[in-house]
């Protein structure tokens, strides 16, 4: 393809709002253009890369006998009401009405729709298992779209759904999909690590995320340097080993703590280490208020709280709710009260006695509070985020942190949707049972961004050859010179028989062409310049920067060998 005929609007400067490196490079190299906040057009180079990613995905899906379909993006509200997610999903669900006032959603995902399709057709265990997938645009009304394609309001996704008669079958497909995802990310050139994760709004009992390591990752990965252990920080278990620091029990004492509203401020005021201070926080769990205690240097993990109580309906109490409940503001709360409020505590509270707690009176705290004497703990548990350097649950060493971009996720949904939506099959005894389901997603446009995030240098993108928009970049330095133009035209005709060639035939300065070539980042560059009359061209690898002058008689063989080595 002649570059003069391709729409590649490269940029010298990018908007300051483009925080992520991949966002800046995709804009600068002319791959995407913003339509509005969180919504982008994919320009020719990006479209070619997306097609290459999708081809790899389709190949790996077919390898595990998943069958492609295509479902509508527009979904009627009644389906979401059946599953209970119409109200539960929240403001990220894009909602709209037709001319008759009927409500619809632009699908962020397709669990409800696929279940409705399948329930009318899958009636016997003999039809199972079945795995269907699609590649389609999805929609989420993100509160704060950012990082370009990494968190947008419209994005491209591959989602797959499997249906089973028993757990063994679901396990098998889950593993097949897990390994397929691993192959996909290796093939597209991403360093992605599978991690134990939370299922979030989709639900389910078992899930792994595939995280592309990145400095601007939205998620923190906890991993081991000595094993395969990896988990999203929300799911990383904190191992409790008793380390009691019990002093002689002292009398409960009320003290004035003016302008003290945080654990750190309290530690400074009392001249105590932060880890000897406690924080008391109030949550609404399924309509019931509870209090949770953690040490001052720890942070409560609401995902672990949801798992402990077995519900998704957990929210931090508002300041007004707290004042009505305990008569004090956040920062002055504690577990000593005469209210019917259950108190829970993180395991590491066990190590402390004579603790400092809020007096449930603004500007006052209590010294030397003790469990059993002054208040009771309903239950202890792992309610907090792990800290870097703490022991890992698998015994392999200490926790290390890395940032990551979620590019894929696999879920065991179980019967969450089939039970809610009455999707049943007849087993070999003729008994009706709810279908077991799995759900498996890959962010196609996210993957594009993650590839760029991991494959670049100070000059631009470095495309892995598996997804590159073109194989070769043929550049004529000065097309006004006849010997250069004729040789470049000859090589273009010759090379495009074997490779997908981008031929820079533009009447631009050499510096502009080379800068654009670095930005675009095709694997191999062939430059027709001052030695054209002698039949010599320069061949350069984009990843290493190594270049060599090559006689055109040897060019095909040289490029073939070079391409195989990349």
Image (spheres, helix red, strand yellow):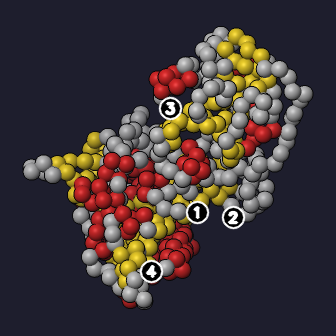
The mark that comes first in sequence, 2 or 4, is 4
Disc 1 residue crowd, few under 14, some 14–19, many 20+, Cα 10 Å: many
In this rendering, position of residue 115 left or right of residue 347: left
Residue 194: assigned label: 1
170 lies above or below 264: below
Residue, disc 4:
165
> Which residue is the site of mark 2?
228
Query: Where is the C terminus found, in terms of image quarters?
Result: bottom right
Secondary element under disc 3, as helix, strand or loop, is loop
Question: Residue 312, position in %: x, y?
Answer: 48, 49
Say whether residue 443 is left or right of residue 272. left
- Left or right, 122 with respect to 394, comes to left
Count of picture labels: 4
Marking on residue 481? none
How much space separates mark 2 and mark 4, taking CA atoms? 31 Å
Q: Is residue 489 above or below residue 313?
A: below
Which residue is identified by label 3?
Answer: 317
Asked if 100 appears above or below 113 in the picture, the reply is above
Q: Quote the CA–CA distance across marks 1 and 4.
A: 27 Å
Label 3: how many residues lie within 10 Å, few (<14), some (14-19) or many (20+)?
some
Residue at the image point whose x is 48% and y is 27% from the top: 321
Q: In the drawing, does residue 122 fall left or right of residue 441?
A: left
Assess whether mark 3 and mark 1 are in contact (beta carbons under 8 angstroms). Answer: no
Quarter of the figure with the N terminus: bottom left
**Element assignment for label 4:** loop
Question: Is the residue under label 4 in contact with that under label 2 (CB below 8 Å)?
Answer: no
Q: Earlier in the sequence, mark 3 or mark 2?
A: 2
The quadrant where residue 543 appears = bottom right
């Amino acid at each position: 393809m002649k570059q003069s005929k391709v729409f590649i609007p490269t940029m010298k400067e990018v908007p300051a709002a483009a925080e992520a490196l991949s966002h800046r490079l995709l804009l600068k190299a002319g791959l995407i253009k913003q339509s509005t906040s969180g919504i982008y057009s994919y320009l020719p180079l990006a479209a070619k890369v997306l097609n290459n990613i999708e081809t790899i995905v389709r190949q790996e899906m077919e390898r595990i006998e998943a069958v492609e379909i295509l479902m509508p993006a527009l979904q009627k509200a009644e389906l979401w009401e059946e599953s209970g997610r119409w109200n539960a999903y929240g403001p990220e669900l894009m909602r709209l009405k037709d001319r008759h006032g009927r409500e619809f959603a632009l699908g962020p995902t397709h669990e409800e729709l696929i279940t409705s399709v399948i329930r009318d057709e899958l009636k016997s265990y003999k039809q199972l298992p079945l795995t269907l997938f699609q590649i389609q645009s999805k929609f989420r009304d993100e509160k704060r779209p950012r990082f370009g394609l990494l968190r947008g309001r419209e994005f491209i996704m591959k989602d797959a759904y499997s249906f089973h008669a028993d757990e063994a079958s679901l396990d098998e497909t889950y593993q097949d999909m897990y390994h397929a995802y691993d192959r996909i990310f290796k093939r597209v050139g991403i360093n992605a690590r599978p991690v134990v994760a939370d299922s979030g709004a989709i639900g389910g009992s078992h899930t792994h995320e595939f995280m592309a390591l990145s400095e601007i990752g939205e998620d923190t990965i906890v991993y081991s340097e000595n094993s395969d252990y990896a988990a999203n920080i929300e799911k990383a278990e904190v191992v409790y080993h008793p380390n009691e620091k019990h002093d002689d029990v002292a009398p409960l004492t009320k003290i004035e703590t003016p302008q003290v509203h945080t654990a750190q401020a309290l530690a400074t005021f009392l001249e105590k280490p932060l880890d000897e201070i406690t924080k008391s926080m109030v949550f609404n769990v399924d309509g019931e208020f509870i209090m949770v205690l953690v040490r001052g240097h720890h942070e409560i993990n609401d995902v672990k709280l949801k798992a402990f109580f077995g519900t998704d309906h957990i929210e931090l109490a508002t300041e007004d709710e707290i004042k009505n409940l305990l008569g004090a503001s956040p920062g002055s709360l504690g577990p000593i009260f005469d209210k019917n409020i259950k108190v829970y505590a993180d395991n590491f509270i066990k190590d402390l006695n004579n603790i400092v707690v809020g007096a449930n009176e603004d500007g006052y705290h209590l010294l030397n509070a003790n469990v059993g004497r002054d208040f009771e703990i309903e239950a202890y548990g792992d309610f907090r985020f792990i800290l870097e350097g703490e022991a890992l649950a698998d015994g392999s060493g200490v926790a290390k942190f890395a940032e990551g971009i979620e590019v894929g996720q696999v879920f065991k949904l179980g019967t969450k949707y089939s039970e809610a939506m009455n999707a049943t099959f007849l087993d070999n005894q003729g008994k009706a049972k709810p279908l077991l389901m799995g759900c498996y997603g890959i962010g196609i446009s996210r993957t594009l961004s993650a590839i760029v995030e991991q494959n670049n240098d100070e000059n631009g993108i470095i495309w892995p050859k598996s997804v590159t928009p073109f194989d070769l970049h043929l550049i004529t330095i000065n097309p006004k010179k006849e010997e250069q133009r004729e040789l470049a035209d000859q090589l273009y005709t010759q090379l495009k028989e074997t490779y997908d060639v981008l031929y820079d035939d533009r009447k631009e300065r050499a510096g502009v062409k080379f800068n654009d070539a670095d930005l675009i980042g095709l694997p191999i560059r062939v430059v027709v310049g001052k030695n054209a009359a002698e039949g010599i061209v320069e061949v350069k690898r984009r990843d290493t920067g190594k270049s060599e002058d090559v006689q055109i008689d040897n060019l095909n063989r040289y490029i073939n060998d070079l391409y195989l080595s990349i």
